[in-house]
Amino acid sequence: AQSVTQPDIHITVSEGASLELRCNYSYGATPYLFWYVQSPGQGLQLLLKYFSGDTLVQGIKGFEAEFKRSQSSFNLRKPSVHWSDAAEYFCAVGITANAGGTSYGKLTFGQGTILTVHP
Amino acid sequence: DGGITQSPKYLFRKEGQNVTLSCEQNLNHDAMYWYRQDPGQGLRLIYYSQIVNDFQKGDIAEGYSVSREKKESFPLTVTSAQKNPTAFYLCASSFGVFGRFFGPGTRLTVL
């Protein structure tokens, strides 16, 4: 079964500093990969996704992520963090699963990384 | 504006009572999902529905029930059989196979 690990529960950075959030996945084939962001008490918003092709993907809000097959990783990066980036970030793996005789796209989420930004 | 509405935002119930969480979407999406979120555990799938009048159990369906009588609506009932119902519940609808558009969530507290 697929799984996703986000090794860092909580990360603190200063505003203007660079950011890297780690994500490792376990899956037999190349999965579809996603990063979501969640502000406190809110739903999740998609930052970016990787399906195939260029392993460096660009997302919204200045974020990017790099897929590294050899390391089973999909780390999220931002060159300069803004105070408004403080939130919880979730990495997710998507696979095609079967249930009840039909297939659907199943997302498995990591545990999340809380980002705190100091002024 | 298109989106997903979840109501109420905060819900309090006494132990042993059933409670229904509302989820409405006007995005014309066929598929809808319910996730449960607990601190440090990410999101776990409770139920999903790919089409009206059809739904499937997710990874943690025990103690929950759903219905899908209309395309726009996918209510979730948390029954008294759910051992630890206090959590943040997120509804989502799907554009494409993996696209998920999330609602703002309902925080349920069982006293």
Image (cartoon, coloured by chain):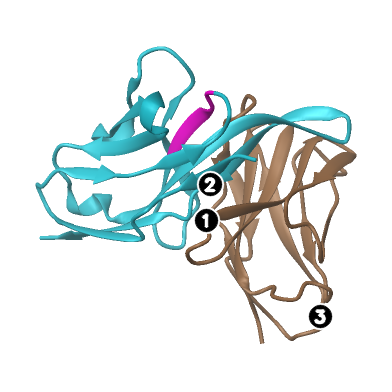
**Which chain wears cyan?**
A
Q: Is residue A16 above or below residue B83?
A: above
With B92 as the anchor, is A10 left or right in this view?
Answer: left
Quarter the C terminus of chain B occupies: bottom right
Q: Are marks 1 and 2 on the same chain?
A: no
Q: Chain of mark 2?
A: A
Q: Chain of mark 3?
A: B
Name the residue type under label 3. Answer: Gln
Q: Which colour is chain B painted?
A: brown
Q: Is residue A9 above or below residue B94?
A: below
Give me the residue at 46% from left, 62% from top: A41
With B82 as the anchor, is B42 left or right in this view?
Answer: left
Identity of the residue furthest to the top in this view:
A53
Q: Are marks 3 and 2 in contact (CB under 8 Å)?
A: no
Q: Nearer the viewer, residue A66 or B30?
A: A66
**Total tally of numbered discs in the picture:** 3
Q: Which mark is residue B42?
A: 1
Residue with the mark numbered 2: A109
Which label's residue is closer to the chain start, 1 or 3?
A: 3
In the structure shown, which secondary structural element does the residue marked by tag 3 occupy? Answer: loop
Q: Which residues are magenta?
A: A30-35
Q: Where in the figure is residue B73, as x and y percent of width and height?
A: 76, 46
Q: Is most of the magenta stretch helix, strand or loop? A: strand
Q: Nearer the viewer, residue A53 or B73?
A: A53
